[in-house]
Image: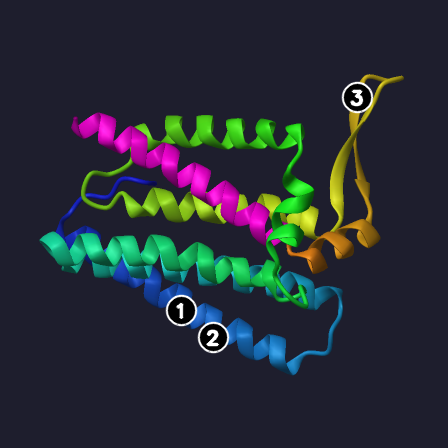
Amino acid sequence: MISVALTDDALAKEKSQARRAGVASVALLVVLFLLPFTLFTGFVAFAFAVTTWQFVFHGSTAVSMCLKGGRRKLFQIAVAITFPLALSWDFAKDAPSLTASGIFGQMATPWLLFPVALIGHVSWRMAKDLDQEHPFRGFLIASAVIFIVCLFGYHGLHTEYDDYSETANMSLDKEAALEAAQSGRFFGQFLLYVVVSYAAMLARLWKRHA
């Protein structure tokens, strides 16, 4: 999935997939605007997110395959940076103002070390499969996965450990999630995790080419 062969057939396939995903995204967006908000709308919104992701992923791959040398590298860097920044807007939009204390204040705990270490480790392992010509695809996948994980917390879903049963249980706390969202915590959390993931993958890439 991360690797892609540089052939005419592969380029045609990427263009075709991007085109189909783009058409589907436009159609689903029209449906979202026309339908009143219902449970069905949530499924449509999810389908729109999936097709939009496919359009960005395959479309940017097709563009990268058409470029050479420095232009390809600059394009990949631009996409790898722009994509998570665009996703971060979903976490930033509820914060009246973004301040350093609001973004990082609630994250300055020892518990932060566990997700940071886990993300760094998984990203390091994943980087061994990055394609040499189009490594940015792995960075886009990492950003999307981290976004989905942070989205659970953004909507109030989190895990709690029960000492009595020695099990982890899922719970929903929308009030705490709203307070964290308005402080900008999820915005900072998402970007921090992306930076950690990118740094781990870049370190593995540099090690491969050393």
Name the main secondary structure of what is drawn in magenta: helix
Q: Secondary structure at mark 3?
A: strand
User: Percent position (x, y) of residue 15?
Assistant: 26, 62
Label number found at residue 167:
3
Disc 3 marks which amino acid? Thr
For mark 1, what is the residue? 22
Q: Sort mark 2 into few (<14), some (14-19) or many (20+) by Cα contacts within 10 Å.
A: some
Given residues 153 and 96, the one toward you in this image is: 96
For mark 2, what is the residue? 26
Given residues 132 and 116, the one toward you in this image is: 116
Q: Is residue 21 left or right of residue 88?
A: left
User: Percent position (x, y) of residue 139?
Assistant: 37, 45
Q: Secondary structure at mark 2?
A: helix
Q: Does the segment drawn in magenta span residue 50?
A: no
Say how the picture is coloured. rainbow
Given residues 34 and 119, the one toward you in this image is: 119
Q: Is residue 76 left or right of residue 187?
A: left
Q: Residue furthest right?
A: 164
Which image quarter: residue 76?
bottom left
User: Percent position (x, y) of residue 116?
Assistant: 53, 32
User: What range is drawn magenta here?
Assistant: 185-210
